[in-house]
Image: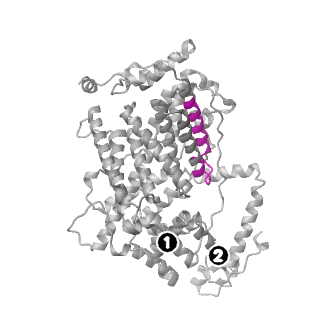
Amino acid sequence: MEEHLMYPKPSSIGACSRCRTRKVKCDGSVPQCAACTKHNTSCDITDHVFYSYETVRRLQATIHQHELRQSTNVPVTATLSSQHSLIHQGIEPLSVQRPVSVTIDNALSSGGRLPKALNNSGNDLATIETLAEEVGSLALGQQSSQQYIGSAAGSSFCRIFFHQLNLASEETLGHIGSNFRQADPFSTQASLPPKPVAMLLLSIYITRVHMWRPIFNLKDLRSWFQQAYLSPKSCDAFKKFSIFLVLAIGSYEAEEKEAYRKLMDIHSPAEYFTTSMIFFDEVSACNNLQCLQSTLLLALWLSRVSNFANNTHLWQISRFAMSLAIELGCHRNNPRWEIGSSERELRNRIWRCTYDLERSVAVSTGRVLSIRNQAIDAPFPKLVDDDVLIESERNISPTFATKGFSPAIHMFRLRNITGDILESIYIARPRAGHHPSIQDTVVVADSIRERLARWHSVLDECAVSESRESLEMRLELCLAVILLNRPSPSFPSPMDSAVEACADACQTAIQTWKVLLDRNELGISWKSFHDVFMTGLVWLYCAWKLSIFDENSVEHFATACISILEYIDRTAGRSSRYIQFYGRIKAITIKRFRSQDEAMIQRANSDLEFDHLGFDWMDECFNELFTGAGDSFALDFKINEDIFEVPTHLQDMHSR
């Protein structure tokens, strides 16, 4: 078959590796030279030929035309092969359902009603548990019953909200079918783009990424780009990996910018990323500072372009980066170490970037932290002469030009606070054999609220007012307030003051996302989708719990959430079922909102006395479930009452 294929003529030909080793003339035939064909051996001539820009552009146009024709009439076998491709890559297609447990897809089945097996009230608890787990699994991008899902990811909040909303007995839940985009079975690589394109992408990377996580020395990074065009062969694997991954991240951030579109870059972000990964094995072979920088850069890429399926890998990468940083001693500031001031500053920056990444991923996925703040004495980054921006970069980001690393340092402090929320409210670890009481947790929560208030008080000093960076920092503050005050394992029924703080933070966050959306500055990533989705659910909970908002306000903010989610999902197209699920929860909440009588309103607004161990709240859920079921509830199971026995030390603590 290959003998009849027509290959374009290369503009430049080098000898294949076999001919070069044997020091014989290579005719440069593609895809196999004559000498290798004669001796029936493998040939890598395709790695040593180069094509002109016009040839590549013409081939890409031809491929694009074929893809358009094929997309109009895709056979069933193509869908099956795409699923096989996804599974082969280790990515579970969102249409694959678990055979036993109830997912959002099969719990909200066709016909507008729950399956018969779920209409029995005896299975309502299992339904709520599984739906809550799947909402929590959105933070991981997976649907595996064997995967640990942390409380901070939203599963505990959804479990409490869905119980109180009596979600499982609702009969108006419609079908939300699964959808997934067919995977491209081909992966192409990119070459260095024209220098104007590369310089623009570098400027965008500096102002949009380096500003928040300065993992490189800016002077060195600029010199590597110059070296790549003046003497590309002198660049080592680390520089090549960094250059191409910076191009990948920069082109991803610049896709909506008119200046970038005018340059007509023929390569996509994925192609730049594919090229960079050629050099990653060599870079990661040694556990040194360059390996840590490369790992952080890879994590920055995954945090942006993950199609809600690679978040577990991102968690593992962040843990590896943290382990390597601790191994290299980046978290320590030992004055006896004989290192220069520039290298010491670079190590401090790399550590803070690692710290920021690990805590951001841990809070989003509900995982535990690797290191506590008491073990860290590395100082915060400081502005140096090498950080001076050029004119084009100052125009892109006035905040970075005027404030330096103040926004990044302020965000590092916020990560410190959110990490403490995770460990005190969601993961209450016993310390020195002492189990923290509910009073201890309340004291910690109040101190965290004070720290958040102080952080907010100096926010305007760290960024230009109403700039993109200022709005993004405001969003992160709102998410921290929501994380602290929403229902959690420590506070399953928060006080009205906490719910009101949650409602205010939800409204501010949704309004800020709308502003960024209107200004075409809203970032698209797995984290932004999860943040908007969870904020929307918390807003519905607050509106239902407080009953002080009018129906139009509830509808307005919930509809705004849906429009934001649809915008974020417009490119991936993999999470519409979550959007439809949120629409169902919104409809149910508004229905409950309308049908509440005076007694229900008083009950919802009263401060219920919840047992600190959570058993009173559990009994409340069971009582509501049994009362609603009436005589139709089939007691076809036995409960081992021993599992409800409270240990003696907990009884003593509870009595105190």
Which color scheme did the rendering employ for the protein? one colour
The answer to whether residue 48 is left or right of residue 447 is right
Residue placed most toward the observer, 325 or 380: 380
Q: Which residues are magenta?
A: 565-590
Mark 1 vs mark 2, CA separation in Å: 29 Å
x and y, in percent, of residue 648 in the image: 26, 24
> How packed is label 1: few (under 14 Cα within 10 Å), some, or many (20 or more)?
many
Q: Which mark is residue 82?
A: none
The amino acid pointed to by label 1 is: Leu
x and y, in percent, of residue 145 in the image: 51, 38
Whether 422 is drawn above or below 627: the answer is below
Q: Which mark is residue 202?
A: 1
Q: Quadrant of residue 63?
A: bottom right
- Nearer the observer: mark 1 or 2; the answer is 1
Q: Which mark is residue 46?
A: 2
The residue under the point 36% across, 44% down is 422
Asked if the stretch drawn in magenta spans residue 175, the answer is no
Whether 621 is drawn above or below 5: the answer is above
The answer to whether residue 341 is left or right of residue 232 is left
x and y, in percent, of residue 228 in the image: 50, 79
The majority secondary structure of the magenta stretch comes to: helix
